[in-house]
Amino acid sequence: MAGIDDFVNKQKPGARFVITAQMLRMTPQQFDSLAQEWMEDGGPGFDLAGIPHRVVVDGQFYIARLTVTRHGEQT
């Protein structure tokens, strides 16, 4: 299973890209919890760059996709 670092490291510094629950093989409920943390504290190597996309599961809204921007190279 690919981890979030695998997806982030494939991107160039400053690149804007999408992370989805499906990419990480998570349910929307699992991804929503993780995405909430990233929204508050920033993600591992990226920042939120857009409005989160939500899906409805059993009448509840959950974040299923985030658009993010990779951090620049650290020197």
Image: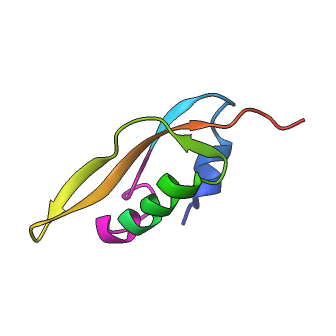
Indicate yes or no whether the magenta region holds residue 56: no
Indicate yes or no whether the magenta region holds residue 27: yes
Q: Which residue of the protein is positioned furthest toward the left in this rendering?
A: 59
The residue sitting at 11% across, 71% down in the picture is 58
Q: Which residue of the protein is positioned furthest toward the right in this rendering?
A: 75
Q: Which residue of the protein is positioned furthest toward the front in this rendering?
A: 40
Position of 5 relative to 75 (above/below):
below
Q: What kind of colouring is applied to the model shown?
A: rainbow
Q: Is residue 62 left or right of residue 13?
A: left
The residue sitting at 49% across, 35% down in the picture is 17
Q: Position of residue 63 (x, y in %)?
A: 31, 56
Q: Quadrant of the C terminus?
A: top right
Q: Position of residue 12 (x, y in %)?
A: 67, 30
Span shown in magenta:
19-31
Q: Is residue 52 left or right of residue 73?
A: left
The residue sitting at 39% across, 64% down in the picture is 31
The residue sitting at 32% across, 55% down in the picture is 64
Position of 6 relative to 14 (above/below):
below
Image quadrant assignment for residue 15: top right
Q: Position of residue 41 (x, y in %)?
A: 58, 56
Q: Is residue 54 left or right of residue 5?
A: left
Q: Position of residue 33 (x, y in %)?
A: 41, 68
Position of 37 relative to 50 (above/below):
below
Image quadrant assignment for residue 3: bottom right
